């Protein structure tokens, strides 16, 4: 548990108050939620659903009162905007709705994630299984990863979405929505005057995790790069506030760094494939030996880069014989 939920205050150009709530989500993982005092009390994201996260969110509200004298509680939240359908951002929704009558908003491409949580979890797990089987991992490793992925079973009760977010101004609010797929299908950035809530699209110091579109549509590096360039072109942004880590004083610069980072990783991936390589082999060469959940994250990240190169004709699959005859073959990639 965080235990030091140090709340920070910001004001937009027109004087709208924003409070950053650093909420413990998992071990070594803090999610930045934001309370925005526009004409409605708006909460942006609500951290995860595991034990300790809801208490951490509550403590942030207590600290708002003690540090800023702001007598606002979870019960006063009128609008809950979820920046994307990842559990470290929406998991606390059940807790927020138990306390308040907040209207829930999320992008249309992530509606099903929170409205049909179990169904999506099961379907995505099946697509993940096929992806892992084709990656060249042993049956035992695949089963281990699927087991790890089952941790979220039953952790969240599906909720009804009240407001479906789409590109453009959000009705009855001062927010402007920018759809930014890639890291998650329904990822949004939110502009409020001269501040951009970049969520997990752009982060200070780290690059958001990538997965191949093979598993879930509207993920993948192609969408991600395009969305980075779109958000970079938005004018009048003085400060970025991310979903994790610190503030982003220069969003355009951070986007340039993020793009350069992935270009370098793509080139590295291409060079790894001088000889035919399975995805498991590419992942091992890119990231070395990883442990527990990080093995899964590594192979997904490697998969996103290989997929991007393959779709653009920069890699080809070379083991045609096996692919023609096996039901679910391991693919081997090589530089073209
Ligand atoms: Zn995320
Ligand atoms: Zn996140």
Image (cartoon, grey):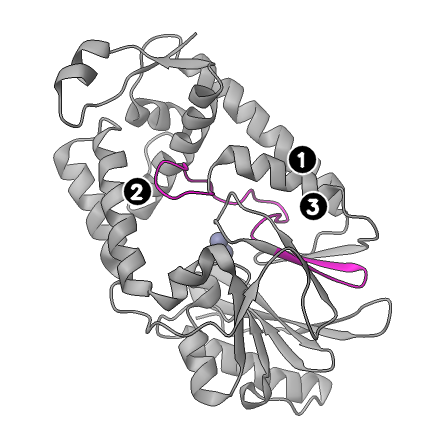
Mark 2 or 3: in front is 3
The relative height of residue 65 versus residue 12 in the rendered view (above or below) is: below
- Per the image, the residue denoted by label 3 is 231
Residue at the (57%, 79%) spot, across then down: 60
Relative horizontal placement of residue 126, taking residue 24 as reference (left or right): left
Magenta stretch bounds: 189-218
In the picture, the disc for residue 257 is: 1
Decide if residue 128 is in sight here: yes
The extreme bottom residue here reads: 71
Relative depth, front residue between 133 and 164 = 164
Whether the residue carrying mark 3 lies under 8 Å from ligand 1 is answered with: no
Residue 49: image quadrant is: bottom left
Q: CA distance from mark 2 to mark 3?
A: 34 Å
Residue at the (40%, 78%) spot, across then down: 94
Determine the secondary structure under disc 1.
Answer: helix
- Per the image, the residue denoted by label 2 is 291
Determine the secondary structure under disc 3.
Answer: helix
Q: Earlier in the sequence, mark 3 or mark 1?
A: 3
Q: CA distance from mark 2 to mark 1?
A: 27 Å
Residue at the (63%, 77%) spot, across then down: 42
Label 1 crowd (10 A; few <14 / some 14-19 / many >=20):
some
Percent coordinates x, y for residue 178 in the rendering: 65, 53
In the image, residue 201 lies in the stretch drawn in magenta: yes
Label 2 crowd (10 A; few <14 / some 14-19 / many >=20):
few
Quarter of the figure with the C terminus:
top left
Q: CA distance from mark 3 to mark 1?
A: 14 Å
Relative horizontal placement of residue 227, taking residue 295 as reference (left or right): right
Mark 3 or 1: in front is 3
């Amino acid at each position: 548990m965080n235990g030091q939920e140090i709340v920070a205050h910001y004001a937009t150009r027109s004087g709208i108050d924003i409070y950053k709530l650093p909420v413990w989500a998992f071990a070594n993982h803090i999610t930045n939620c934001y309370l925005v005092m526009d004409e409605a009390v708006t909460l942006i994201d609500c951290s995860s659903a595991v034990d300790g996260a809801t208490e951490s969110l509550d403590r942030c509200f207590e600290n708002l009162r003690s540090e800023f004298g702001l007598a606002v509680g979870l019960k006063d939240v009128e609008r809950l905007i979820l920046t994307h359908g990842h559990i470290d951002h929406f998991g606390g929704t059940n807790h927020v709705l138990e306390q308040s009558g907040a209207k829930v908003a999320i992008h249309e491409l992530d509606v099903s994630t929170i409205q049909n949580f179990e169904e999506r979890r099961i379907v995505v797990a099946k697509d993940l299984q096929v992806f892992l089987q084709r990656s060249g991992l042993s049956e035992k490793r695949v089963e281990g990863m699927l087991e790890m992925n089952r941790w979220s079973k039953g952790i969240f009760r599906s909720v009804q979405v009240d407001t479906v977010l789409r590109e453009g101004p959000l009705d009855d609010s001062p927010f402007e929505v920018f759809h930014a797929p890639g890291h998650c299908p329904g990822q949004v950035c939110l502009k409020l005057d001269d501040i951009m809530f970049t969520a997990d699209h752009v982060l200070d110091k780290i690059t958001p995790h990538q997965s191949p579109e093979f598993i879930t549509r509207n993920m993948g590096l192609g969408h991600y790069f395009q969305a980075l360039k779109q958000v970079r072109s938005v004018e009048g942004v003085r400060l970025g506030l991310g979903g994790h880590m610190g503030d982003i004083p220069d969003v355009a610069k951070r986007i340039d760094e993020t793009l350069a980072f992935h270009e370098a990783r793509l080139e590295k991936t291409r060079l790894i494939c001088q000889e035919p390589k399975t995805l498991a082999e590419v992942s091992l060469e890119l990231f070395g030996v990883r442990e527990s959940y990080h093995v899964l994250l590594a192979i997904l990240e490697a998969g996103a880069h290989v997929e991007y190169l393959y779709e653009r004709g920069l890699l080809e699959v070379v083991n045609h014989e096996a692919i023609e005859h096996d039901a679910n073959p391991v693919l081997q990639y090589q530089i073209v």
